Amino acid sequence: MSKLILSLTIFVMTYQITSTAVADECEYRIIFLPQIHRNVIDSRLGETNIEEVAKSQFHIAKIILENSEVPIFSEQVDENIIASKIEGDLRLAGEKIKFIFPFGIPENFESLSIKQKEQLAFAGADFVLLFIHKIQVLYKVVENRSVSDAIFARINELMGELKPSDKIDSYSELMILVDDVREKAALNEIKKYFNLNPKEKSAFLIYGKNHNFRRHDDIFPGKCIKTPQSLNY
């Protein structure tokens, strides 16, 4: 049994066995899937490492496929996306991805073609799985698109003011927007989902690996946010 399959097995068992202390204390759980993704904010960080990003997205895809009934909240999504209702440019992008993944996600990362790695890196595991109909819905991590646009407009404005030598303070307006505001928005969306769907007890949250969602106990208990062992980069 490979290390990945073993870690996934342990992960599934961990969240299915409700006799543990954490399970008893947590009515609802967020399963945080920390991702390595393309650099879309700070151009000073240089080119994206396609291989590294693709490997991160591949592992996330495998975990989702093993637990396809769990709802997925994606960092990329500012309006809920339903596979059967995709249209326009998004539909065209989906057709391209279906062509590149005719047999779904390969069993092993080494079996991915160069084009498949590129699509995983640039589209993300969540959208690849949505386009090849392995999942049916991606849920938003912000109240609506207008709110998301306003946040990123200000982020881009602040980034444009940075000089190449500038260091970004953790408590600056920029980092509060990048981290604190967006993290709270995501947790609030998941919290609203659980309130509307009380029978659902777990949700996946795909977000950048440097984010710390456990610090927002006022919105969702940090002890009930867990990360699969295979994604502890």
Image (spheres, rainbow, N blue to C red):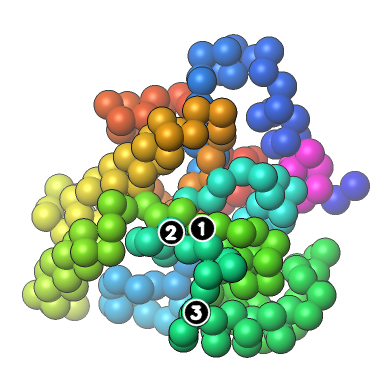
Q: Residue at x 38, y 61 (%)?
A: 79
Is the residue under label 1 in contact with that under label 2 (CB below 8 Å)?
yes
- Residue 132: image location, x then y, percent: 68, 71
For the residue carrying disc 1, how many other residues have a C-alpha within 10 Å: few (<14), some (14-19), or many (20+)? many
Q: Amino acid at mark 1?
A: Leu
Is the residue under label 3 in contact with that under label 1 (CB below 8 Å)?
no
Q: Nearer the viewer, residue 61 or 81?
A: 81
Q: Earlier in the sequence, mark 2 or mark 3?
A: 2
In the displayed orientation, state which residue is furthest to the right. 1
Q: Amino acid at mark 2?
A: Asn
Q: Is residue 42 magenta?
A: no
Q: Residue at x 55, y 87 (%)?
A: 92
Which residue bears the numbered disc 3?
Answer: 87
- Residue 233: image location, x then y, percent: 56, 51
* Dominant SS in magenta: helix
Q: Amino acid at mark 3?
A: Glu
- Residue 219: image location, x then y, percent: 30, 30
Circle 1: element type: strand
For the residue carrying disc 3, how many other residues have a C-alpha within 10 Å: few (<14), some (14-19), or many (20+)? few
Q: Is residue 110 visible?
A: no
- Above/below status of 11 relative to 146: above
Circle 3: element type: loop
Which residue bears the numbered disc 1?
Answer: 138
> What is the count of numbered marks?
3
- Above/below status of 209 relative to 20: below
Circle 2: element type: loop
- Above/below status of 17 relative to 127: above
Say the numbered circle drawn on residue 80: 2
